Amino acid sequence: MHMMAMRHLRRAGGLALGVLLLAMAPGVAAPVGAATRELQTLLPGWERFFSVTWSASQHRGRPEVDGYIRNRSPYTVSNVRVLVDSLDDAGQIVDQRLSWVAGSLGADGRIYFEVPVSPAPRYRVSIYSYDRIEAASLMTP
């Protein structure tokens, strides 16, 4: 009985690890439909601090959106995530992809990103979230 319980625990642990790794993968799709809500940026007004230039292209025969994010703020940021909306001809969202951008982005710097997407007539790219890095200061007594 003990061996059977151990096998079930191992199988459940492997399944949980697989789900966790899938959730952490870049470019994870967030299908839009009747049962789901559209993702929206967590930071309205992100355009004051960042600009995004991008284009739709093909990589190994698959569509992707790639481009650059420019940080116009005086702060260094990390954990940047971009949200790419795939739009139909009427401008309605048919798919969304949320992807991490590797690295940190210094003040007045720029960083490259690429996100695999679903084929669509148009796309919209926004900054979904980021973390501002606060500099530690050394205080002397």
Image (tube, grey):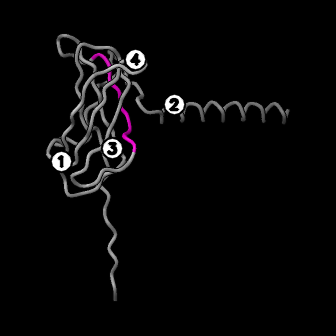
Q: Is residue 43 magenta?
A: no
Name the residue type under label 2. Answer: Leu
Name the residue type under label 1. Answer: Phe
Assess disc 1: are there few (<14), some (14-19) or many (≥20) residues with their C-alpha within 10 Å of its C-alpha: some
Q: Which residue is mark 3?
A: 80
Q: Which residue is mark 4?
A: 62
Q: Which residues are magenta?
A: 94-102
Of the numbered discs 3 and 4, the one sitting upstream in the chain is 4
Q: CA distance from mark 2 to mark 1?
A: 31 Å
Residue depicted at 32% across the width and 73% down the height: 137
Q: CA distance from mark 3 to mark 1?
A: 13 Å
Of the numbered discs 2 and 1, the one sitting upstream in the chain is 2
Name the residue type under label 3. Answer: Val
Residue at the bottom extreme, as displayed: 141
What numbered label is drawn on residue 22?
2
**As drawn, 21 above or below 30:** below
What numbered label is drawn on residue 49?
1
Residue 138 location (% of width, % of height): 34, 77
Counting labels gives 4
Of the numbered discs 2 and 4, the one sitting upstream in the chain is 2
Of the numbered discs 3 and 1, the one sitting upstream in the chain is 1
Residue 118 location (% of width, % of height): 35, 17
Label 3 vs label 4, nearer the camera: 4
